[in-house]
Structure formats: C-alpha cells, structure tokens
Image: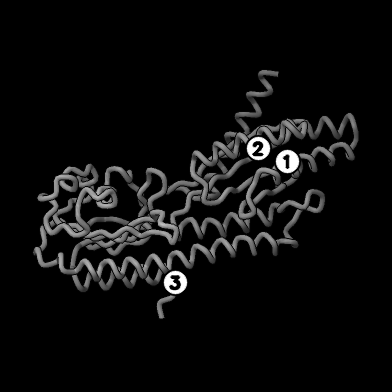
Amino acid sequence: MIDDFAAAAQATMAYLRHRLGFRLWMVTRTEGDDWIVLYADDAGYGITPGQSFRWTDTVCARMVLGHGPNIAPSTIDVPAYAQAPLGRHLPTGAYVGIPLRRGDGSLFGTLCGFDPQPQPPSIREELDTLTLLGSLLATILDRELDSGSEARLADRAGADDARDSLTGLVNRRGWDMFLQREEERCSRYGHSACVVSIDLDDLKFTNDTQGQGSGDALLMRAARALEQVTRGTDVIARLGGDEFAMLMVECDYFDAQAMLMRVQEALAAADVRASLGMAMRKPGYDLEEAFAMADAEMVRAKRSRKVLN
C-alpha cells in the first residue's frame, strides 16, 4: 500500500513513464523564486533530486499562469513554452504538467514530464488521468504536511531531557537533534528554513563585575525575549555559555528578515546586547552548513561592534 508522499511520487512517475514514455518525470516544489526537484525519474537529462532552477524560467511557471496547456505534444507550437529560458538546460519537444496545490489552494509545486522530441497529439487524451494522479498526490502531500506540523509540536513538547537547566531552552544536544529532523523534512518537501546564531556581548563583563547571579539574570532575559517573538514550531536553544541559536521552519527570506528585526527589538527591550548572524537553508547546502554560515556572520558582527566601540 502506498501511503506516503515519497512512495506515491515515485509510483506516479513510474506509471506515467510506462503509460506515456517521456524521458524525464519530476515532482517539484516552488519556494520563492526557486523551482526545486524533489523526485525525478530521469532517462537522459541528468536531473537529480535537490537541484534547483529559477521558477520564472520554467515551462511549469507558464503552465501555472495559464499561458499554455497542461499537455503540449509539441512545445514549439506554444510560444510561451518555446521561449522558456530553462529550455536551454531541459530541451523540451513535448511537455505535460499539473499544479500540485495544498488544501488551502496555495501552490506547492508541479507534477511534470519532459521529452526532447514532439509526441503524438493523442497524448492530450491523458489529461483526465494526469489530473487525477496530481490530485491524489496533492492529497497525500497535504496530509503529510499537516502531520509534520503536529510532529514538530510533539517534538518540542517531548524534549524535556534535552533542555538547558537555567533557561529551559533546548540545549546543544536538543539543537543538534532538531536540526537533523528538520533537515530531513526540508530534503523531503523542499521547505525553506532560517537559522540564527546569537552571542551575548556582556555576559563575561556582567559576571565579573556584578556576580554570576546577574549573569544568570541576563541569560534569562535573553531567553524570554527570544521566546516572545518565535512560533511554537520554531526552536530556540542555548548552546552553552553566552551562545544561543534559533531555527525558524518553513520561513522564506522576507519572513526571516522580519523575524530578525523582531528579535533585535525584543533583545534591546530586555536590555540585552548581542551580536547576530542569519543564514537561509537553500537547495545546495543543508541546515548544518547554513548554521555555520550564520555563525560566521555573527562573528563578523561581533568583531565589527568591538571596532566601533
């Protein structure tokens, strides 16, 4: 029985290859201006899962906008498809594509097929079959994404043995665990995510001049400030000493920028001075690599603050 999105995607592509041929079948995700290949059944194009292209350059983008049909036996006869810039990378003589939409109607991605050669006009008769398969795939996807949100909340609630004893935030072990679990979701569904590295500027000075109790109070103010501006599915961690980290899930660049501003405002309101670095998880590098980039940006910010002071 096929009851998960990955297996359903693979089975759907295998069935369509058997029924229609075509050299390339894909299940894709649109995320911002990225068109991300989640699953591929490829016989000659050299496409692998995880690759991304510019969404606006694709035939699928034009199909979703209604600039061409779901089934084009000869793309040269459809000007919008023939002129798609990605055609230089994916030679397209024939094309089929169906949008994959969430239950709320928002676009998730596409189920699509490409062949370098034009195909018989009779393939237009397969539209009902293609539409049905896309609808079934989207239903499985929507169910999994909803259960994934519930799983995140359950993970957060069940992390009592991976918490920092002072602040109650996730500790280093918990952070590594959540980062790994979210990376699995990102790889599976093409989610974007944002990671933030935070280093308090005054903890050592506060401990040295006012005592550890004041230092602990500073850490607590920082923790509560971060909790005020995050969602229940996000992760806040105290990695040790004066180091904090944040993981914001299903968060695009613009959402991340807005969140970072709220973080800065919340810390300032709590009288906490800190250096921050942010990076996005994108196709091509994972969450651990993104966090390393955020950490490097935080270090640069801290050095810059020292020079200014």
Mark linked to residue 225: 1
Assess whether mark 3 and mark 1 are in contact (beta carbons under 8 angstroms): no
Q: Residues within 10 Å of mark 2 (few under 14, many from 20)?
A: many
Q: Which residue is mark 2?
A: 263
Label 3 secondary element: loop
Q: Is 277 positioned to the left or the right of 40 in the image?
A: right
Q: Residue furthest bottom?
A: 1
Query: How busy is the neighbourhood of tag 3: few (under 14 within 10 Å), some, or many (20 plus)?
Result: few
Please tell me which residue lies in front, 69 or 199: 69
Mark-to-mark CA distance, 2 and 3: 37 Å
Q: Give the numbered dot on residue 298.
A: none
Residue type, label 2: Val
Q: Judging from the image, what secondary structure is the residue with disc 2 in?
A: helix
- Secondary structure of residue under mark 1: helix
Q: Amino acid at mark 3?
A: Asp
Q: Residue at x 25, y 52 (%)?
A: 63
Q: Write the residue at 43% across / 65% down.
A: 141
Q: Tell me the residue at 64%/64% (across/down).
A: 154
Q: Amino acid at mark 1?
A: Ala
The residue labelled by disc 3 is 4
Against 228, residue 3 (above or below) is below
